[in-house]
Amino acid sequence: MRSHRIALIPGDGIGPDVIEAAWKVGEAVAAKESFALEPTRFPWSCEFYAETGAMMPEDGIEMLRRFDAILLGAVGWPASVPDSVSLHGLLLPIRKAFVQYANIRPHRLLPGVEGPLKAEGFDILCIRENTEGEYSGAGGRIHQGTVNEVAVETAIFTRAGVERILRYGFEQARLRSGRLASVTKSNAQKHSMVFWDEVTRELAKEYSDVEVTSYHIDAMAARMVMAPQSLDVVVASNLFGDILTDLGAAIQGGLGFAASANIDPTRSGPSMFEPVHGSAPDIAGKDIANPLATIWSLAMMLDHLGESAASERVMGAMEAATARGIGVRPGSHTTGAITDAVLNAIEKD
């Protein structure tokens, strides 16, 4: 029997709730498709930080290296640990250590879900650069707490980093409609973003079958609201991609439906899959968190592991549940009820 070793990091807040829900779905579909998922749970979280002074052990990355994939719930408990500490102590180190340079986020309406826009027939795949750019962590502060305080945050763009994420975007466009939108702000950022545009034009010569359009970030934000159906594959820097995909989550009905994958296309290390939403401490443990974003992330994980039939089965079960009106609005159903609806659809399939 095929087997996949999965590292589970439930994390904080609603993370444990949605990971538990998604894992039930994973076990059910694995039984249907005759393969095994071997989980190992890691308690790395803000609670772990409070106990140890670190978000994960010093050898945490090496502990994760032996797994085929990582499924993460949510990270953050700002009442006790600053977000800048939790993010840079767990999520970002994993992305960078395993060179998960492609952050993939799909945006479309599931059946029965009503978004805030008149447009419904959109299917956008946002590809965000995931290891450098504006989130490189380069910079510092001096004269802290004085009137002369200075803070510097330096965005770092390398030719290797920009070229590989754009090339990944071109390849995904080839698999879809053959249309790619590249997002920058080169009219204002005359070094890094002009550089990004130049690399885009260079690569476009290799992909003559792909129609390339360059947008400024503000124009792209407007287009995602006014004409989302005109977009297919969108590729952007770390910061711009982060912002655009929250907008993408909004137009697809909310963060409860927003899934993501942190991919190492070379497969030299494990890739990581997680919902886009945060830890939502105020609703943790109340059985009201929507698990669909995490279940969708699980489907993306299964596809990455080569279990395409299982991935399609999970997506079909989710769509069957939402088509019946289950989980389509915040608070309309409990976490357990939504999970059960997906599980029932899997069993009936």
Image: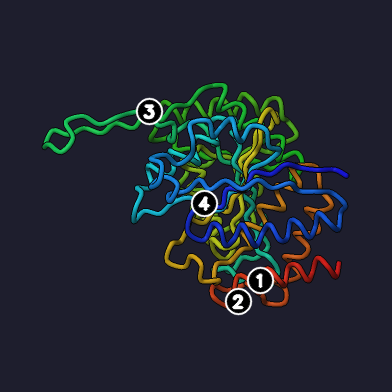
Residue 194, above or below 339: above
Of callouts 1 and 4, the N-terminal one: 4
Q: Position of residue 323 (x, y in %)?
A: 72, 73
x and y percentages locating residue 146 in the rendered image: 12, 36
- Disc 4 secondary structure class: strand
Instruction: Please name the residue shown 59% across and 50% down the image.
Output: 274
Identify the mark nearer the N-term, 3 or 2. 3
- Under circle 3, the secondary element is strand
In the displayed orientation, state which residue is furthest to the left.
Answer: 147
Going by the numbered disc 4, the residue's amino acid type is Gly
Tags 2 and 1 touching, CB below 8 Å:
yes
Which mark is nearer the camera, 3 or 1? 1
Say whether marks 1 and 4 touch (CB < 8 Å). no
> Would you name the residue on which mark 2 appears?
333
- Find disc 4 in the rendering and name its residue: 11
The image quadrant where one finds the N terminus is top right
**Between disc 3 and disc 4, whose residue precedes?**
4
Q: Earlier in the sequence, mark 2 or mark 1?
A: 2
Q: Which residue position is annotated with label 3?
A: 138
Total tally of numbered discs in the picture: 4
Query: Residue 173 vs residue 45: left or right?
Result: right
Residue tagged by mark 1? Answer: 338
Q: Secondary structure at mark 2?
A: loop
Q: Identify the secondary structure beneath mark 1.
A: helix
State the separation of the CA atoms marked 3 and 1: 42 Å
In this view of the protein, which residue sits in the foreground, 112 or 349? 349
Percent position of residue 77, x then y: 40, 54
Q: Residue at x 71, y 38 (%)?
A: 68
Q: Tell whether label 4 touches label 3 (CB within 8 Å).
A: no
- Mark 3 is surrounded, within 10 Å at the Cα level, by few (under 14), some (14 to 19) or many (20 or more) other residues, namely few
